[in-house]
Image: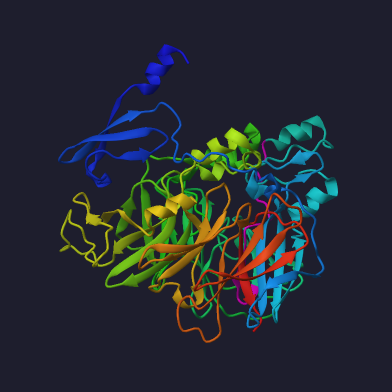
Amino acid sequence: MTIRKYIFKVFINFIYVSKKYWFKPDYEFLPINQILYITQKKKNAFWIFTAAAQKTYFTEVHGLPNISPLVRSVEETPEPIPTTVKGTIPSWIHGSLLRNGPGKFEFGNQHYNHWFDGMALMHRFQIVDGHVTYRSRFLRSDSYKQNSERNRIMVSEFGTLALADPCKNFFQRFLSRFEMIKPTDNASVNFVKYKGDYYVSTETNYIHRVDPDTLESKQKVDWSKFIAVNGATAHPHFDPDGTAYNMGNSYRNKGAFYNIIRVPPERDGPEDTLEGAKILCSIAPRDKSKPSYYHSFGMSENYVVFIEQPIKMDLFKIVTGRLRGKSLNEGVFWDPNQETTFHLIDKHTGKEMPVKYHAKALSTFHQINAFEQDGFLMLDMCCSDDGQAINNFLIQNLRQSGEALDEMYNTMSRPLPRRFVLPLNITSETPLEQNLNTRPDSTPSSLLEHVSLSQVFCTFEDLHGEDLKDYGGLEFPHINYARYNTKPYRYYYGCGFRHLVGDSLIKMDLESKKFKVWQQPDLYPSEPVFIPSPNAEEEDDGVILSVIITPVKDKSTFLLVLDAKTFEELGRAEVPVNIPYGFHGVFNSSA
C-alpha cells in the first residue's frame, strides 16, 4: 500500500450524527466495517472520528476444525430405514421430525457457490414407541429436474448464476444476458403448514406441497397467483386457530413494498392451497430502490412486527445481474449508516401504527418471541452488530481450513439474543427525551424524540450473561411455541455458534440468564425443536430433538433426544447414512 493510499484510508472524518443515536457516554466501539470512536457528546450531537484502516475482528478463535464434509452432496434415502437406538427415547413421542436443507451442491462439472443454493433435501425421522426410522428425498422442483436432465446448472440460485446454454447459438446466448433472472422453486429452507397441509418453502414466490409421510412432491404453488407478491418468507407465524401470517415483497412501478400476508385456516376442498390469502398491509421502504432484506419477522397477540434492517437489496444490480454476469447475492449489501426500524401492524385492522421505533444498525435472521405486557411490546430476537454474514456463507468459505477458516470466523459478528421494549401508548402527552420503559428490572431504554412525536429510539437488553459469548453467541432459536408464542415465557433454546455452523445446544433461563449446554467434540447439532410432554404443566416439560452430524466419521449421523428440563441426554437414534448440515424443520405429531 502506498503512503498516499494509507493516509487516505486513515484520514479522520468528522461526521455529525443527530441526537437520535443515543450511544452510551464516554468511549464506545461500533462494528461498522470501520472503527468508530465516539469522543465527545454535545448537547444535540455526537462527533465521530472514523478511522477506516483494516478489518474488524470480533473474536480471536484459533484452530477451528475443518467442516467441509458437512456441506457435501449425498444420496437420497427414499425408503424408510431402521436406526440403532442407544439410551431411551420416550414412548410418548409419536410423530415425525421433518427437516429441510441443501443436499446436492453440483451438477456435472458445475458447482454452486453459496450454501443457500444447494438442492432441497427433505428428511423424516419417524418416532413410534421408542423406535426411529429415517428416510430422505430430494424435492422434485423444476430446478432440480431441469438440472438433472441436462447434468448442469440450468436455473440460477441466490449465489450462483446459471451460464448460458451452450446448445444455443451465439446470438441466442447474447440475448439471454438481457433476460431477468427467473426465481427458483428450490424450496430448501423450511417445512411450513398452511390449512393443515405441509409445504416446503424458500423465499421466492414458489412453495411445494409435500406428503409428510413419503416426502413426495405433490404440487408446486405460486404465491403470486393468489396475491400480488413476488415471494414470501419461510417463517410464517400462527394464531391458535391456525390463521397464518407471513411477509413478502412486491415490486411495482413505484418501487418495492413490504407486505403483511394473512392466510385463513379454513379450506374449501382437498385441492385448496392458498385460496383466501390477503395482503393485510403494505409498507413503503425507506428507499424503494433499495429495500431491506428480511428472513423472518415477529408477532405478538395483536401486532405483526416487521424489522427493517440495514441489510439492503440493490434492485438495479439485481435486475441487471444477468447482463453484468452477477448472481443475486451480489446485489445484497450491509449499510451500517442506516438505522434499524421496527414497524408495528395491527393484526385486526391491518393498519400500521404511526409510531416508528428506531435502533442502531443491527442485523437479524430469527426472532425468539414477542409479547405484550403492561402497555409495552417485548421483542426478543437474535441480533448481530454487523450484517455481512449472508454473503460469508459461500461454500468455499465453509470448506476452508487452517488460518483462512479462523479469519473468516473471527471477522463475523456473533449473533446474540436481545430484547427491545416498545412502548405502545404514545400520545401528545408523552414526555420527550425521557426513558419510557418503566418496567421494573428492565434495562432497555425507549426515548421519544423531540424532532417528531412519532419516533422512538430504543436500546436493548442482553438476554444472556457474558459467558454465552464463550459459546459463540446463539442462533436457530426455539421456544415452546404452542403454549408460549406471543406470551410471557421463561426459556428459549438454540445453537451455540463457536464455528460457522452450530456446535452446541443451549437452553437459556431468562430469569437468571444462566444456561445449560449440550456439547461434544466434533459433533454439530441442528436447530433444536421442542416437543411438549403429555399433560405438561411447566414450560420446559418435554424433550428437545436435534439432528447431530460429524465431519470426522463417515455415516455417523444421529437424532438426539434431550430432556428439556435437565438438558441431559435421554437417547439417540443412529442413522447409517450421511446427512448434510441443514436449516429448519418442524415436528409433525401423530398422537
Viewer-closest of 279 and 59: 59
Vertical placement of residue 229 versus 565, above or below: above
For the question of whether residue 308 can be seen, the reply is no
Q: Main secondary structure of the magenta part?
A: loop
Q: Is residue 68 left or right of residue 251?
A: right
Viewer-closest of 402 and 221: 402
Q: How is colour applied across the structure in the image?
A: rainbow
Which residue is drawn at the image coordinates 71% and 64% (left, top)? 123
Q: Residue furthest bottom?
A: 535
User: Quadrant where the C terminus lies?
Assistant: bottom right
Q: Position of residue 285 (x, y in %)?
A: 42, 50
Residue 89, image quadrant? bottom right
Viewer-closest of 12 and 95: 95
Q: Answer whether residue 397 is magenta in the image.
A: no
Residue 528, image quadrant? bottom right
Vertical placement of residue 281 versus 313, above or below: below
Viewer-closest of 513 and 385: 513
For the question of whether residue 172 can be seen, the reply is yes
Q: Answer whether residue 179 is magenta in the image.
A: yes
Q: Is residue 237 left or right of residue 550?
A: left
Q: Residue furthest top?
A: 3
Q: Is residue 455 left or right of residue 75?
A: left
Q: Position of residue 494 (x, y in %)?
A: 51, 61
Vertical placement of residue 374 versus 23, above or below: below
Which residue is drawn at the image coordinates 25% and 46% (left, top)? 22
Magenta residues, start to end: 178-197
Q: Position of residue 383 (x, y in %)?
A: 43, 52
